Amino acid sequence: MNKSITLAPKKELKKNLGISFGIAVMVGSIIGTGILRNPGSVADLLQNKWLIILAWTCGGIYVLLAIGSLAELAKWNTYRKRKTKDWR
């Protein structure tokens, strides 16, 4: 009556995804939600297809300029840290 049951070892997933991956997923989902939800409201406000295209083009140019500015700031910060040996 007393049968010993041996359980197979649990197979777990590797935990090699860090905090940066979690942040990337959060940012991606926020941006994705905005891209999926905003075109309808923009189209309702503008009512003209050329104005809609112009608004999205201006938004894209603005984002490209912002990305360029942030990349320059990140490069400058790395240069400053290397120059002053401030690697905190």
Image (cartoon, rainbow, N blue to C red):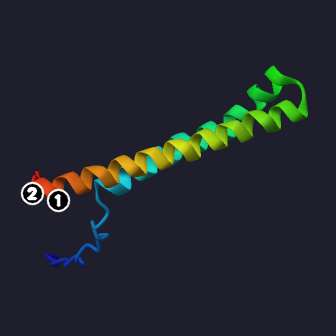
Coordinates of residue 33 in the picture (x, y in percent)? 60, 39
Coordinates of residue 19 in the picture (x, y in percent)? 29, 53
At label 2, the amino acid type is: Lys
Q: Crowding near pointer 2: few (<14 within 10 Å), some, many (20+)? A: few
SS assignment at label 1: helix
At label 1, the amino acid type is: Arg
At x 88%, y 35%, the residue is 50
At x 17%, y 78%, the residue is 3
Q: Give me the C-alpha separation between circle 1 and circle 2.
A: 5 Å
Q: Is residue 58 left or right of residue 53?
A: left
SS assignment at label 2: loop
Observer-nearest residue: 1 or 42?
42
Picture mark count: 2
Which residue is situated farthest in the top direction here?
45
Q: Residue tagged by mark 1? A: 82
At x 30%, y 51%, the residue is 76
Observer-nearest residue: 36 or 5?
36
Q: Is residue 83 left or right of residue 65?
A: left
Q: Crowding near pointer 1: few (<14 within 10 Å), some, many (20+)? A: few
Which quarter of the rendering shows the N terminus? Answer: bottom left
At x 75%, y 33%, the residue is 55
Observer-nearest residue: 69 or 48?
69
On residue 12, the disc is: none
Coordinates of residue 80 in the picture (x, y in percent)? 20, 52
Q: Quadrant of the rendered structure where residue 54 is?
A: top right
Q: Badges 1 and 2: C-beta atoms under 8 Å apart? A: yes
Q: Is residue 45 left or right of residue 32?
A: right
Q: Is residue 73 left or right of residue 59?
A: left
Q: Residue tagged by mark 2? A: 85
